[in-house]
Image: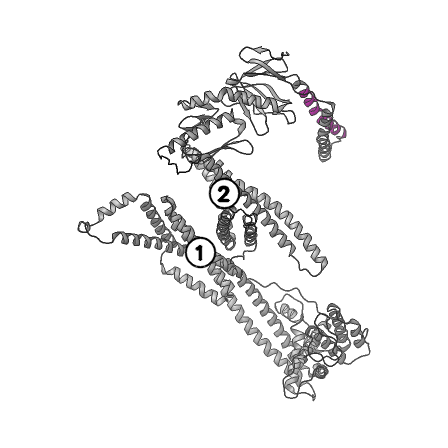
Amino acid sequence: MGAEEGAERPGLGRHRRTYRPQRRRPSAYALLLLTLVPFSILTYLLTLLLGAFFGWEGADAAAVLGGLALLGPFTIRALWYRRHTRVEFRHYEKGLVAIAADGTEAVYPWPSTAVFTNGSNRYKLSNPEGTVVTLGAAHRSPALGGEKIRGLRTRTAIRGAQLPQEEEWGPAILQGVRDAQLAPAVETALSGGEVSFGELVLSQDGLTVRRRRGRDDFTTWEDVDSLSLTAEGDLLVASRGSDFPTHFARPGYQVPNLEIFLDVARRLHERRSQAARAPATPTPAEPTPIDPESAARDDEESTSDVPELLALYVTFGLGVWAAWRLGTRQEIDGPGSALLAAIRAAFGGFFGAVFGLGLAAALMAVPRIVGELLVESLIRWIRHRRYVAAAALALCTVAPPMALLLVLFRAIPSRLVPLVALLFFGGWTLLLAMRRCSASERLIVRHLPDLPGVFLVVLAVEQLVSGDVLTLTPAAGLFFPLAIWLSWRGWRKLKDSTRPTVQAVADIALSVELGLVLTLLMVWLANVLSFTPPQVTVVRGVVEKVQGLTEVHWLYWLAAYTVLAVGSYAVLRWPDHVARIRQRLRPARFSESRLPLGITANFARRSLSGINVGIMVALLFLVVLAPVSEGAWKRPVAERYALEVQRRQYAEGAAAAYKEIHQQVSAHPRAAARLRDVILAVHRAAPSPPGEPVNRTALDIARQVGRFQAATLALDDPAPQPAQTPEADDLDGRLGQLDESQQRTAEREQQTDRFAELASLAITRTFDALDLGDNQAVQLVKEYLGGLVEDGPVRKIFHRWGEGIGRPPPDGGRLVRIDVRRLTTVAYDSTRAAVERADAGLLAFYGRFGIGIPTDDTSLTRAVDLANQHRYLQQGTGPCSGCVNSTTSGSSTGGGGGRR
């Protein structure tokens, strides 16, 4: 089977070289064995798992299966290696002869051989008889599969041969086929014939794609924008033809003689382009005509970076947002928490970037999937009169996304509508910045849009998650002038277009943009200016009255606007017919007049356009305002409602406690006699001049003593009852209930203040003669009761008991009865803990109050001094002789009454 160097073969010429696969070394077999070991172990473990699951004793069976999983593929691959080492490829001047392991030959003359290649430099050769051989480089995996050729019955002689010296035989095959087939193909095409490359047919008129069913796809060379190869070696044809896909892609492994096809197609394309430019006689001063292919390629190169940059913005934007949300999730109050925040931010950034990478890949794949697989197939099926299949495809394509959008819009309209506006106007601005900056020679200028691009993604994600970027943030005010300017610029750009369809759509686009901006601006003003519930009610009432002025359903306005839009399109699309109709309707007596009909018609047209825009803006504003404003105003209204309900509940509990104290003191006057010593001790700690109101320091001390007394009661602080939100889902119901809740809260607070005054008067009347006026005593008692009732769990317990969901509260006698030792102990422990938290002088505190409270001390002076110390730690002002202060407040120990 060997061939002598230089020997000739009839029809193929002189023999040049023979190529044979390399013999495998023992290391290759050992490497193959190591590669199959993990697969064998996995098979063994899965067999044991299945045996344990079904209750089989399958240890031996698992070992057998694991051995077969190792030796079976190894044996098959080893036999394949040995078999393929006996094949030969003899290279001749005019062809190639492939000799299989069994000695059969397959001849491939260059003039009739079809060569298929792909990006991995794998080759498939086919002769007119349909005999196929596949081969590739020695360092690559075997080229398996893909031997079938459309329209030809094939038989595979050699499959996946791996040959060394790829740099020799690979270019030799391509060059031989090119030299033998390129010139005849070009001559046939230029002479008016057709050249077939599988299902692709080239001719002088254009490119045809043969279809098995229906009509073939055809595009003229004038409509072809580009013919190119992708990075993966696939063929990509961009065309503007109505009978051809906009982007036609075909794997390079399916196009025979791909290089010859591209060469012939580009020559025909260039020839037709030159013929189209021939009528315009160039002058010496004119520049050289630009090749459409190169122009399209340059334009493609100038815009090819935009999707990649947008993908990077999405990736890094999600990473930044995740890092920021996780990093600021908890408050930072030390180095440890700062380190944990940094770790959380790092993890958040990593996982956010990974998710953003997947999302960016999906977003980049959507146009290709929708455009090439769905839209192109839909157009092709309609053109081929496959209406049922086209309708089914359209239904399956449009129905799920529309259903998803409808569900999302009904669920969170207040987030989706601002998100759409943010992405639309923000993305438009970003694209303009990228176009302006990409042409700069300075690197820093070209990368200026990167930070705004990432920031736009962060804002979009935050808007989707929290829904407050464009409706609650004060800085969003900068967005609205920019959006209005972009709307006006886009409208002018669409109006200047030469296409009637684009001109007709200009008013619609401007209306939608201004309607969205106006809606968001209305909601933003209501939130930023902190509209109260009555103001929100007034605004909504005005909007409803404006909507009621139309006195018709909004669908009628939509129908009227549609008619106006269709009329505008008709005027722009068929101006000759409109002018003819106008001429017929013009009276004869005005035919010779010189009235400014042109100016009048232009004014009428502009007025009609303005009416169109105004109607659509009002329509969109009134339709979208309700769901968007409800979502934006609903949260602050609900929060205010919850706070008002909570205030009302606390006021009810405090009123019940004051009422109980008043009844107890009225029935048992001596029960409050001990409070006389408290009031006197407070007055001595912070005296007030006779006849004047009690100073603020004394009131604060009395309130702090009341808090200590509430702690001595050993009452469990009940869990706060969640405020009930309104049952009505509409905003009007929420506003009405909020107004009612505020009114009830105000009434309860007034009632609570009256009960507190009555209880204070009742307690003061039980006192004997005091060194201070009755008015001062009432004020101190009222403040003491405020600390006892309102600043602790007492009011919560009384309220829950009144609602029938809690245990009975303590009686009035227990509330006003004072255990001096217990009170002093609580005051000492609470104040010492406050000193430690404030990082004050703990030793100075021990020096004044001692370590522990003496059990034989029955004076209230010590508890009042501790209350004054506790107050001084928080305020740092007022008389407090010998008190210690926080080291961070700027004051020192007060030897003479502290600061004022």
Residues shaded magenta: 59-81
Residue at image x 70%, y 58%?
A: 337
Q: From the viewer's perspective, is residue 375 above or below residue 866?
A: above
- Does the magenta run of residues contain 362? no
Residue 637 lies, in percent from the top left, at: 53, 63
- Does the magenta run of residues contain 79? yes
Residue at image x 59%, y 67%?
A: 646
Camera sees residue 624: no
Residue 43 lies, in percent from the top left, at: 71, 31
Give 263 or 151, whichever is nearer the viewer. Answer: 263
Q: Quadrant of the C terminus?
A: bottom right
Camera sees residue 330: yes
Give 121 or 389, whichever is nearer the viewer. Answer: 121
Instruction: Identify the disc placed on residue 484.
Output: 1
Q: Specify the quadrant of the image occupied by residue 115.
A: top right
Q: Amino acid at mark 2?
A: Pro
Q: From the viewer's perspective, is residue 588 above or below residue 40?
A: below
